Image: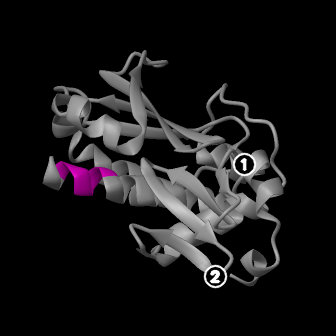
Amino acid sequence: MKALERTSFPEIAERVSALYNEEDDAMLLGMLGQDYVIRHSGILLHGQSAPENHTEIILDYLVSKGIEFTMIPWRAIGDFLGEPAQDFRQQVELPLAQHVAELISRATSLLPHIDAKQVESIIGSDMAFTVRALPKVHLHVEISQETEEFPAEVWVLFSNNAHTFLSVSSLQTLAEVFKDRMLSLLRIY
């Protein structure tokens, strides 16, 4: 949080595509369909202090060196690590795979809540959508239903240069927040 105390918001807002409010000297930043207010004293969500993992992601995004957004080709988190990411699969993709049928049948009501839109699949899956997780970090999600031969699957990919806006650990956390948000929305809508 110390980084926020002495940060020039107008410069950062332009680089990371946040809105700057000169009167309040604050920024408004959208993440996974929710608006966060960033002040020199902290980050707020719905008028309350944002959860710690959300704050970590946003702080990492604000201090990143990234400038230009490049969406495709999509990349797996292992591409940024240089090795397969089993933890990512366990923490993000497999929990979502348990709800594939619900995700597909309720996509129309769920996707607007996370700033997502349905797109054409790049691998021939049953459904695909792109999420504007942060203004310059997008997720691409591919979903396949269970068949006689294969279990239900979910694959979560990142925009091509997401690692220039977030560290790999923050990318992992962002995907976990996305998963938690999707599962929470399934309970509500």
Q: What kind of residue is marked 1?
A: Val
x and y percentages locating residue 30 in the rendered image: 52, 50
Q: Which mark is residue 41?
A: 2
x and y percentages locating residue 146 in the rendered image: 20, 31
Q: Rate crowding at label 2 as few (under 14), some (14 to 19) or many (20 or more) other CA atoms within 10 Å.
A: few
Q: Gap in Å between the C-alphas at discs 1 and 2?
A: 19 Å
Q: Nearer the viewer, residue 164 or 50?
A: 50
x and y percentages locating residue 26 in the rendered image: 65, 65
Main SS of the magenta part reads helix
In the rendered image, is residue 62 in sight? yes
Q: Residue at x 72, y 61 (%)?
A: 62
x and y percentages locating residue 16 in the rendered image: 72, 48
Q: Nearer the viewer, residue 134 or 174?
A: 134
Stretch of the chain drawn in magenta: 182-186
Q: Quadrant of residue 42?
A: bottom right
Q: Which mark is residue 16?
A: 1
Q: Is residue 136 magenta?
A: no
**84 left or right of 148 in image:** right
**86 left or right of 183 in image:** right
Rendered position, 18 above or below 60: above
Q: Rate crowding at label 1 as few (under 14), some (14 to 19) or many (20 or more) other CA atoms within 10 Å.
A: many
Q: What kind of residue is marked 2?
A: Ser
Q: Nearer the viewer, residue 26 or 23?
A: 23
